[in-house]
Amino acid sequence: MDDQLAISVRGLRKAYGDTTAVDGVDLTVSRGEVFALLGPNGAGKTTTVEILEGYRRRDAGEVSVLGIDPDHADDQWRTRVGIVLQGTGEFDDLTVAEVVHHFAGFYPAPDDPDKVIDRVGLVDKAKSRTHALSGGQKRRLDVALGIIGRPELLFLDEPTTGFDPEARREFWELIRDLAAAGTTIVLTTHYLDEAEALADRVGVITGGRLVEVAAPARLGNRENALTTVSWRTPTGEVERAESATPTALVGELAARFGGEVPGLTVTRPSLEDIYLRMIGHR
Amino acid sequence: MTTTSRTSATPATTVPGRRLGPVALGLRQGRLELRQFLRSRESVVFTMAFPVVLLLIFASVFGDEIGGGVRFTQYFVTGMIASGLVAVGFQNLAIQIPGERDRGILKRLRGTPMPQWVYFAGKVIMVGVIALVETALLLGTATLFFDLQLPATAARWFTFGWVSLLGITACTLLGIAFSSLAQTGRGASATATPVALILQFISGVFIVFTELPSWMQQVAALFPLKWMCQGLRSVFLPASFAAQEPAGSFELGRVALVLSIWCVLGLVLCLTTFRWTTRRDG
């Protein structure tokens, strides 16, 4: 096994009865990388991640996470892995501080609980009972519990669900800090901007298959995609041309119109256009 | 996510660099469980106060002599102590654990390096402490208001000790085993409560056992509660009352045997059926 790889997956399959949830996924994640698994609901993101976390058993394929098959994971392995599950958890009548302090005790070298509570922005809620937190605040608690053990590898399953835009930006900063400190991060999301903002590489999963893995800027061959140039003809009709050399085309048009080109737009396909095309919406 | 940081009042419970030893892990889990129990109004009212209220009502209404110089009040106290153990061990866990499973607390704990036994140690400590308090409350109420005679000999205290210990152990194990039957946290109460209630009616808690039809006595004899009640009667009722028992004696040997069998059965069920995740988690 390559020591540079945090995760290595080959031919991963998982079915629930007649429904195939994961259908032959191959995947590698390097140490220190931020990898986003992007896909619509029901694409197989959570199943894949929960197999990597050791929660679900696969039907077929080879999986190695930090050099260990998660089906045979032990407590030693779990000290190295942080997990933020999809659902938010409630700890009944315990306070935020109590829960974070308690979880810290499970790890050999935990982070300072009070510092972690601060990091996820729950200082003001440290003494609140967990059931009294808002959805976004519960999610922050989930993240706090995921990072309290100072994991080498952190899984985040749709971490920012329920966050307002500001909270999401703050969360992104936290992830960048963790990544800068060398933590390998695997997150699932259905937010494109999140994948684009955080990930070194994005894997697009749909129908249980990984349709592409690439850096966000290269996804769907985006950098080489043709640019659409449109303008209005003298008769008022909108004309459209796809070009690999849009600058030259615009120059040509400027010469033709003798200056300003009426109704000129130059559009590169957005990540969203490419993504929607990949998951089958056109 | 750094906002102005205030230090939390909660003292650090962790020593960085080395994980807590097994004893410390178990004790702090027990403390957490107790804290959670005492903060939950439903638990305190339903599990702790309810048996005391029942004792006050029944013992006040039905004070007639039932033979052998024993009043129903005395008879009922022994049944209520046994029922209290069922409430604290069986009902409490059979309802609480599915709720924790439903809310994802178990799944989350499973993703940490907490050794699995620590969770159960926490439950056992909680049950043990609450059972002690519960029994003391019932004994206190009965001696104050209903002239219950506390055991006068060491031998009787010893019997009281082992019957209670075997009884609470069987109830705890069966409560944990039963928790895996419930599909949802909400359904758990609807399945566990009737089981306990029916057993109370057929095991000689609310009704003098020998007044029940013999087929009902035979059904009850399959379950632990009848034997717990019988064992406790040998502690609190005059030795002469043994003649009123179905077998003409308190059958302490059989009490020990049946309760031990239920302990073993409960343990086997726990080990084979316990689930950290819900069924929908695959």
Image (cartoon, rainbow, N blue to C red):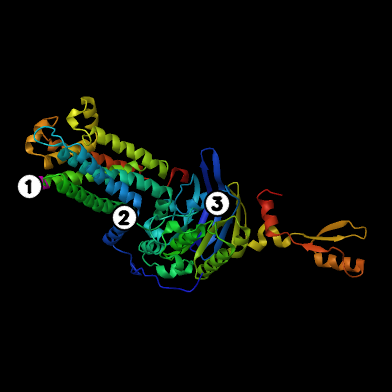
Disc 1 to disc 3, C-alpha distance: 66 Å
B178 over A199 or under it: above or below: above
Marks 1,3: beta carbons within 8 A:
no
Among the two numbered marks 1 and 2 on one chain, the one whose residue lies closer to the N terminus: 2
Which contiguous range is marked in magenta?
B151-157
- Give neighbour class at mark 1: few <14, some 14-19, many 20+ (Cα, 10 Å): few
Point 48% across, 74% down: residue = B4
Query: Is-magenta flag for residue B156?
Result: yes
Identify which amino acid the numbered label 3 is placed on. Answer: Lys
Is residue A154 rendered magenta in the image?
no
Label 1: element kind:
loop
* Left or right: where A281 falls relative to B277: right
| Disc on res. B152 | 1
- Rounded to the nearest angstrom, the CA distance separating label 3 from label 2 is 39 Å
What is the three-letter code of the residue carrying label 1?
Answer: Ala
Q: Quadrant of residue B245?
A: top left
Whether residue B97 is visible, yes or no, is yes
**Numbered disc in front, either 1 or 3:** 1
In the image, which disc is placed on residue B38? 2
**Element under disc 2:** helix
Q: Residue A45 carries which label?
A: 3
Residue placed at 41% from the left, 69% from the top? Answer: A114
